[in-house]
Amino acid sequence: MGVDDTVPAGFVKIEGNVVIDSPATAEQLASLQRTIDAHCPVLDDLIRSVPVSLHLNRAEAPPSKTLEHKGEES
C-alpha cells in the first residue's frame, strides 16, 4: 500500500479552537470550558488510554435461492 512504517497511522497532535460570542466574563467562560472538558466523552477517550479491541468477522453468505421455472403445461 506504500505505507511508511516510520510515520504513525493516526494523529500526532489534535488542536481545536472554539470562538464564542457571549456576554460571559472570562472567568465564567473558563468555568464553562472546565465543565465541558470534564464531561466530553470524545475528549475523555482521546486523553486517556482506552483499550481497543477490533475483530474481523466474515459475513455469512445468505442462503442460496433456488428459482423454479414452471413451464406451460400443454
Image: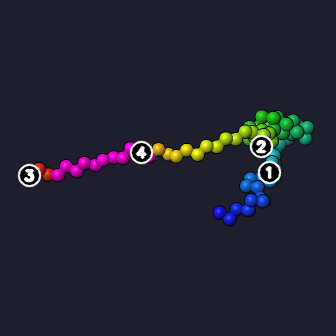
Residue at left 14%, top 51%?
Answer: 72
Circles 3 and 2: CB atoms closer than 8 Å: no
The residue where tag 3 is placed is: 74
Residue 50 showing in the rendered view: yes
Residue 43 showing in the rendered view: no
Amino acid carrying mark 3 in the image: Ser
Circles 2 and 1: CB atoms closer than 8 Å: yes
Of discs 2 and 4, which sits in the foreground? 4
The residue where tag 4 is placed is: 62
The residue where tag 2 is placed is: 46
Q: Is mark 3 on a helix, strand or loop?
A: loop
65 drawn magenta? yes
Residue at left 76%, top 55%?
Answer: 8
Q: Which of marks 3 and 1 is nearer the N terminus?
A: 1
Amino acid carrying mark 2 in the image: Leu
Of discs 3 and 1, which sits in the foreground? 3
Q: Earlier in the sequence, mark 4 or mark 1?
A: 1
Q: Is residue 40 above or below residue 6?
A: above
